[in-house]
Image (tube, helix red, strand yellow):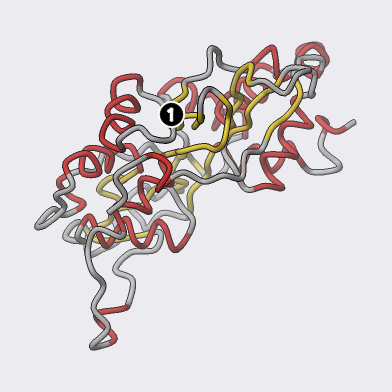
Amino acid sequence: MAKFVKDLMHTNLITCRRDATLGQVAVLLHNNHVHALVVTDRDGRAAGVISDFDLLAGEWLSSDPESLNVMRKLTAADLMSQPVDSVEANTLLSEAVQRLIEKEISRLLVTENGKPVGIISLSDFIAGIAEMEQIKRDTVGDVMSDAILVCRGKTPVASAARAMTSAGWRSVLVVDAKGKVLGVVSGRDLLPYMQSGDVHGKIVRDVMHPALTIDIHASLRDAADKMIQHHYHRLVVVDNEDPDAFPLGVISSFDIVAQMARPDSVWQK
């Protein structure tokens, strides 16, 4: 298991200028399949961070033509978070995990002698958890995924983390034998186990949090509003006329950003 931030971080640091429009930020997030960008000043120094969650505010507030016109004039500098939370590459992973938990944040800018060299995020820690348990290759059952996007409550935490890493998702929906939603396991739910290093005997039912649902016919603004109010990055899509049926899908903050990034979107005109 990796012991230092430099062992787990990823070095593909995606940046944008302070004057980038929200539409341009959406395109960068979507095209690079990332959840956040480092906002830089003229000298290339980190000035802040803007994430897909920050862009939800733009979608939420642009409820009429006048508001949309105002929001389209905003730049990355207007919505970015600052100061940038950073960590040195040689910092112990346990210290980085503790900082994420205490500050309730999803990522840290990684530096070497103060110079940005990468990012470490919840996705990186999920990958670390997935590697904690040695994978057997004796039978099909040893190598199959117990969870990709959906799993049962008895699924081991390590298996859920491994499935999230393979599928490129930051959460797994937990259902019962009939497909009724029991909860959600996200990267943040798994962070304490990265800190302790002990996932033996732990199942997703022990760590999941309540799922937040939205009707399939609701607007994107309704979805963004609900995410912002509850500080959730994803919602389970259901049919309100049959709420106990198997869920229809999931909508995330990244899905909304993808719509903002489309060439025919109002954000690109």
Q: Which of 211 and 239 is in front in this view?
A: 211
Q: Where is residue 71 in the image (x, y as percent from the top left)?
A: 75, 16
Which residue is depicted at the point 28% across and 29% down? 95
Q: Mark 1 points at which residue?
A: 88
Q: Nearer the viewer, residue 256 or 117?
A: 117
Disc 1 is placed on an element classified as strand
Question: Foreground residue, 23 or 119?
Answer: 119
- Locate residue 53 relative to residue 24 in the image: left or right: left
- Mark 1 burial class by Cα count in 10 Å: few <14, some 14-19, many 20+: many
* Quarter of image, res 50: top right
Screen quadrant of the C terminus: top right
In the orientation shown, which residue stands out farthest toward the front?
Answer: 113
Give how far across and how far down residue 185 sits, in percent: 30, 46
Which residue is depicted at the point 62% across and 34% down? 220
x and y percent of residue 197 in the render?
18, 47
Say if 63 sits above or below 120 in the image.
above
Residue drawn 41% across the image and 54% down it? 247
Residue type highlighted by circle 1: Glu
Query: Furthest-bottom residue in view?
Result: 139
Numbered circles on residues, count: 1
Q: In this view, does 156 lie above or below 102?
A: below
Q: In the image, 123: left or right of 14?
A: left
Picture quarter with the N terminus: bottom left
Residue 267, image x, y percentages: 81, 30
- Residue sitting farthest toward the right: 269
